[in-house]
Amino acid sequence: MKRAPHFIIPAIMTSLSGYTLANEATELAEIEKITVSASPTANQLPVGTFDAPVSNLEYDPRVDLQSRNMAEAQADVTIRGGIFENTGFSVGSVTLFDPQSGHYFAEIPIAPQMLSSAKIFTGVDNAFYGMNSSVGTVAFGWTPIKAGGSASLGVGSNDFNLQSVNAAVAMPLEGVKNWQLGFQGEYSHSQSDGTIEYGDHDFSRASARVQLSGPQSQTDLFYGSQQKFFGWPNMYTPFGVNETEDLDTELFLVNHQQNYAAYSSFEVSAYYRKNNDHYIYSRENPSAFEAFHETTVKSIGFSGRHAQSQSFALNYSAQFIEDSIESTTLENNFTSRNYYKLSVLPEYQTDIANNQLLTVRLGAAYDDTNRDDSEFSLLCDINWNIVNTDGSERTVYLSFAQASQVAGYTAIGGSDSGGLFRSNYNLERETTQNLELGLLLEQQTWQLNSALFYRQDENLTDWTYSFDSVFARAANPVDIDTSGVEFLATKHFDTLELISSYSYLHKSETYSTQDIDASFYALNFPDHRITLGAVWTPTDMLEFRIDNEWRKQHENALRSGDDSALFTHLTVKLTPTGVDNLFITLAADNLWGESFEEIPGTPGRGEQYTLSATYSW
C-alpha cells in the first residue's frame, strides 16, 4: 500500500541541469556572462586502467561511486544516497540499459574522447530525460570530431601495464559549404595482478565512429566492443571466497542532432546493446556455482525543445526499450519486457527586470511497461536568474518531480527460496518524489553551488541480509525518506584551482519485513562527505593534480573495520621542453593505503602507482 506523499523539506540542488537554465537565461537577457570552469574533480584519468565513462565520477562530490576492485571493473554509481539501480546512464536521447541488474549499467564501450563531460541530472531533469532511473542520470553527449590523436603506454605496481591509442581525421566535403566528414577510432588495453590478492584484471576496448556534421546538424554512427575479466574476494557474497566475472559488451548506436529556428533543436538516438556475463562464485572451485547471462536491449529515443517565441517553449522527450535475457539462474518466465516513457514539459520565460529572468516549467511524465502498472508523474520548477552588469550571476530555483521505475530481472525473476541471490516476485513499481531548492553564485574567479533536498522513495528494491539466513542476500522493498544538503565550491587563482565540497545525508527507512539485519545498498551511504581537490601549475613543465575524499559512512552490521575513510588520488604531469607533444605522468591512487569497505563485506581496494607516457598529434 502506498503512502500519501508528505512534502516536508524544500530541496535544493544545483546540478548541471541548473547550469543549462542559467545559460539560456543569460542569452535572453543579452548580458555577457562570466564563464568559470568548474570541473567537479581535479583529476580526469584513472590510475589502475584506461579511461572509461565511469572513471571521472570517482571523486565527483555529486556522485557516490562504490566499487568492487576499481571503478572501471564493477562500479555501483549512486546519486544523493540512492542505490545503483536508481542511477541511469544516457548518451544522446537514450538511456543505456541492462535488464539483468544495475551493476552493469556502466558497461559502456565508448571511448571518453568521443563524449562530452558528464552532466548529473536530478529532480525535474532526471524525471524528464531519465528512463527507469528514479533518482539520477549521468548524461553524455557526442562531441564534434577534430583531427588528431594520442598514444599512451603505462606501467605500474602490481604488474600493471597499459596501452591505448586514439586517432581521428576530419575532412571537408567538396562542393558543400561548412559540411565535414569525420572518422575516429580507439583501442585500449590494461592488465594487472590487482591491488589486493585475487584482484587481477584484464580489460580491452575497441570503439569507432563515423560523423557527418554541418552548420545545424551532427550525425554519429558508432560501434564499440569491450571485454573485461576481473576478480575480487567477496565480490558479491560475504563468505570468504574469491569470485570472478567475465564480461563481453557490444554496442551499436546511431545519433542525430538538429538545430532549427531560434532556440529550437531535437535529437534522435537508437541503439542495440548485448552484454554477456559469466560469473564464478569460487575461482578455486568453479563448479560450486557459476552463472551465465546474456542480455540484449534495443532502444530508440527522441527529445527536443521547440521555442514558439522568446517567452514560450515546449520541451519533450520519449523513449522505447525492448529487452530480453537468457540466464542459467532465472527460474520463472520473466525474461523479457517492453518499456515506454513520454515526457512533456512546457516552459514560460519572462523578464521581471532588465537583468532578471523568471522561468517556469510545468509538465508531466508517463511511464509504462507491458508487465507492470503505469505511472503518471508531475514535473514542475521555477527558476529566478539574475545577471549583473559585471557579468556575475545568481540563480535560485525550487522544484518538485516524481519519477518511477521497475525492478531488474535478478531481483524479480530468479528463485525466491534458494541460491545466493534470492528474488522477490511481489516487487511493485518504485516511485520517487523529490523536492529541492537550489542556489548558484558565480563570480569572476569563483563559483558556489548549494543544495537542500528531500526525497521520498516508495517500494524501493534493496538487497538485504539476515543473520538467520546467512547463505543469501534477498531483494526486499523498502520505503525511505532521505534529506540532505550539498555544497560545491571552486576558486581560481593565477596558477591554482581549488575544488571543495561537503554533503550530508539522513535517512529514515521502513522495510516490509522485520527479518533484516543489514542492507548492502540502500543503507550504504555517507552521513558526511568532504572532498578537496587542487590543480597547481607552477611552471609550463609541471602540473600537480590532487583529489581527496573523506567520508563518515553510516554504520552497517556487515562492514569490517572503520566507518570513516580518507582517499587521495595524486598526479604529477611533466611536459619536457625538448620534445613537442609528449608528457609523462606519475600517478598514485589510495595514497594512504585505506582499506575501507565501500560495499559492506567486500574488501576495499589497495594502493596503485603508475608511470605513463603520452604522445599526441
Image (spheres, grey):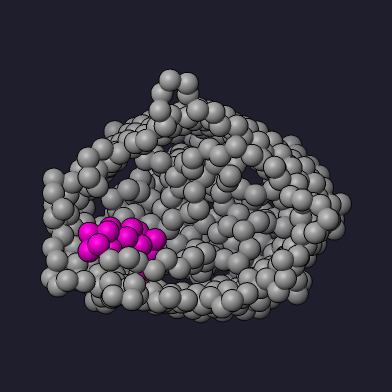
Residue 361 placement (x, y as % from top left): 18, 58
Q: Is residue 233 above or below residue 394?
A: above
- Can residue 344 be seen? no
Viewport quadrant of the N terminus: bottom left
Query: Quadrant of the rendered structure where residue 451 is?
Result: bottom left
- The one nearer the camera, 556 or 43, is 43
Rendered position, 525 above or below 412: below
Left or right of 293 in this view: 142: left
Q: Nearer the viewer, residue 519 or 227?
A: 227
How far across and how far down the image is residue 503, in percent?
46, 76
Number of numbered discs visible in the structure rendering: 0
Q: Residue at x 63, y 71 (%)?
A: 535
- Residue at (25%, 70%) from the top-left corner? 385
Q: Is residue 98 visible?
A: yes
In the displayed image of the protein, which residue is found farthest to the top?
175
- Residue at the location (57% across, 66% down)? 41
Bounds of the magenta segment: 14-30
Which quarter of the image is occupied by the C terminus? top right
- Image side of residue 236 versus residue 395, left or right: right
Nearer to the camera, 80 or 14? 14
Residue 608, quarter of picture: bottom right
Q: Is residue 125 left or right of residue 168?
A: left
Image quadrant of residue 215? top left
Q: Is residue 29 magenta?
A: yes
Residue plotted at (75% across, 74% down): 592
Residue 346: where, in percent of width, then height? 16, 51
The secondary structure that dominates the magenta segment is helix
Tell me where residue 276 appears, x and y as whole percent. Answer: 60, 33
